[in-house]
Image (spheres, rainbow, N blue to C red):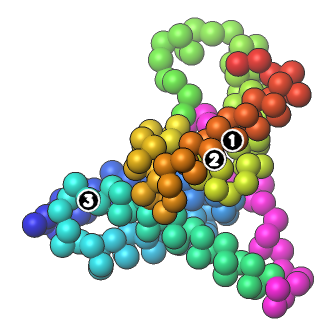
Amino acid sequence: MASDKELSDFLQSVETRAFKRSVYHVRDEEAALDIVQDSMMRLAEHYGDRPADEWPMLFQRILSNCTLDWFRRQKTRKALFTNMSDFEPAGDDGDFDLLEALAVDDDSHRTESAEATTSRGEILREIEAEIQELPLRQREAFLMRYWEEMDVAETAAAMGCSEGSVKTHCSRAVRALATALKAKGIKL
């Protein structure tokens, strides 16, 4: 049985990535923080006594479910209160830039020209914008597979779907991103 310290260490290790993933989905930092906190509490309350090696998959599934619950609540609120503006995407005035956080931080980036740095930043912003335009399930599969570096089976378990569905979602996401970026003249 895992100790409270092990659970605390695990939650601390996934906190930042879970928050970034949630912000990517809901486009609202406060809502993302609530979703991550709720997910962590659910894991601790309901699965804290499970073996530590089960926590990563359980947490991913809980995080996905909490995110879907948030979208359902927003849809209900929108239906009840049509004047709400909660559905507008958050602006770029947030402190974090997901794709910049994913960019490789090595010496080659420190010595590149200002023009190259600016160009790379623009490309990353375009990619981020296109990822946000993906349908929810495609975006979820794409982020789990390529950002969380989960394998197909882990992603399928976390999303509650078949491995074939994960492959289809990822394939469609990659194709949509490639098409959108090509249309904008971006070559990777």
Q: Looking at the figure, which quarter contains the N terminus?
A: bottom left
Residue 32 vertical position relative to residue 45 in the rendered view, above or below:
above
The region drawn magenta spans 79-101
Q: CA gap, disc 1 to disc 3?
A: 28 Å
**Residue drawn at point x = 44 percent, y = 58 percent:** 158
**Circle 3 residues within 10 Å: few <14, some 14–19, many ≥20:** few
Residue 49 occupies which quadrant of the picture?
bottom left
Q: Are marks 1 and 2 in contact (CB under 8 Å)?
A: yes
Give the main secondary structure, helix, strand or loop, of the magenta stretch. loop
Find disc 3 in the rendering and name its residue. Answer: 54
Look at the numbered disc 1 and give the secondary structure of its residue.
helix
Query: Nearer the observer, disc 2 or disc 3?
Result: 2
**Circle 2 residues within 10 Å: few <14, some 14–19, many ≥20:** many
Q: CA gap, disc 2 to disc 3?
A: 25 Å
Q: Amino acid at mark 2?
A: His
Q: Amino acid at mark 1?
A: Ala
Residue 120 vertical position relative to residue 141 in the rendered view, above or below:
above
Q: Amino acid at mark 3?
A: Glu
Find disc 1 in the rendering and name its residue. Answer: 173
Asked if residue 151 shows in the view, the reply is: yes
Find disc 2 in the rendering and name its residue. Answer: 169
Mark 1 or 3, nearer chain start: 3
Look at the numbered disc 3 and give the secondary structure of its residue.
helix
Residue 119 vertical position relative to residue 18 in the rendered view, above or below:
above
Mark 2 or 3, nearer chain start: 3
